[in-house]
Amino acid sequence: MPATYEWQQHYQAALLETDQVRLLKLIKAAEIVIDQRMEELRSKHDGTRAEKDAIAEALAGLNVLRREVQAA
């Protein structure tokens, strides 16, 4: 599935990574890009409800991934 939003490329890379050491780096990179986009949305007061919902879901997914890696 192609990314709808630019930040989703980073999120998808983390989801598909199988190496646990690299996964932690990709989770952090995705969070940084998502945080930058959230700041942009706040400062410009733009973005759609769909993108904001997708961001919330992505951040929740990254938290699950991180917990799984840390529990392993």
Image (cartoon, rainbow, N blue to C red):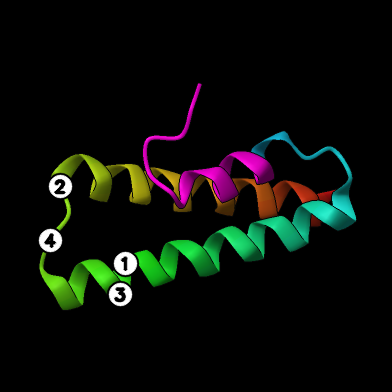
Q: Which residue is mark 2?
A: 48
User: Is 10 in the magenta?
Assistant: yes
Expressed as whole percent of the image width and height from the top left, the position of residue 20 reads: 86, 49
Residue 59 or residue 44, whichever sits in front: 44
Expressed as whole percent of the image width and height from the top left, the position of residue 64 reads: 60, 46
* Left or right of 15 on screen, residue 7: left
Helix, strand or loop at label 3? It is helix
Q: Residue at x 41, y 71 (%)?
A: 36
Marks 3 and 1, how far apart in space?
4 Å
Q: Residue at x 53, y 63 (%)?
A: 31
Q: Which residue is mark 4?
A: 46
Q: Which residue is mark 3?
A: 39
Whichever of callouts 4 and 3 sits on the residue coming sooner in the sequence is 3
Q: Which residues are magenta?
A: 1-14
Whichever of callouts 1 and 4 sits on the residue coming sooner in the sequence is 1
* Amino acid bearing label 1: Met
Whichever of callouts 1 and 2 sits on the residue coming sooner in the sequence is 1
Helix, strand or loop at label 4? It is loop
Query: Which of the 4 image quadrants contains residue 21?
Result: bottom right
Marks 4 and 3, how far apart in space?
11 Å
